[in-house]
Image (cartoon, rainbow, N blue to C red):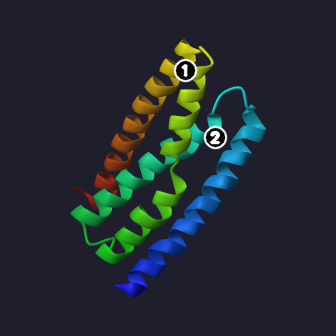
Amino acid sequence: MVTRFLLVCAAGALGTGARYLLAGSVLRAFGTVFPWGTWTVNIVGSFLLSLLMQLGLESALLPPSLRVVLATGFLGGFTTYSTFNYETLAYLESGNFLWALFNVAFTLFACLGAGVLGLWVARWATGT
């Protein structure tokens, strides 16, 4: 139990570092006018979580202990719902209601789409 806990914590630290590097790279490439970095990590995270869960729950390709470390640890540190929430509230507080609505709608539909894609890729990979 302690070993799994420490592995989840270590994976969370790696996920946080990966989020920092990816979001920063995206922001440098596309600018800071809109939260492109947050979108990118949430979409990629949604895809990866669906892929991992499908592989872990529907096949023997991913052992349960590794699934927990990757899903809870790495992807828990990687995704940024709290940042998304803060950015949406900032748009609302500044009176940018359309940007806030767009941010919520885009995040919802893009992450759902990425999640569906992750399931499809996992099912294709396992033949299920």
**Discs 1, 2 touching: Cβ within 8 Å:** no
Q: In the rendered image, which quarter is residue 19 located in?
A: bottom right
The residue at which mark 1 appears reads as: 92
Where does the image place residue 3, in percent across and percent down from the top left? Answer: 42, 86
- As helix, strand or loop, the secondary structure at mark 1 comes to helix
- As helix, strand or loop, the secondary structure at mark 2 comes to helix
Q: Is residue 46 above or below residue 84?
A: below
Name the residue located 48 percent from the left edge and 19 percent from the top edge: 101
Name the residue located 72 percent from the left edge and 39 percent from the top edge: 27
The residue at which mark 2 appears reads as: 37
Q: Which amino acid does label 1 sit on?
A: Leu
Q: In the rendered image, which quarter is residue 30 located in?
A: top right
Q: Which of 21 and 47 is in front in this view?
A: 21
Query: In the rendered structure, which disc, 1 or 2, sits on the residue that comes first in sequence?
Result: 2
Q: Is residue 80 above or below residue 99?
A: below
Q: What residue type is labelled 2?
A: Gly
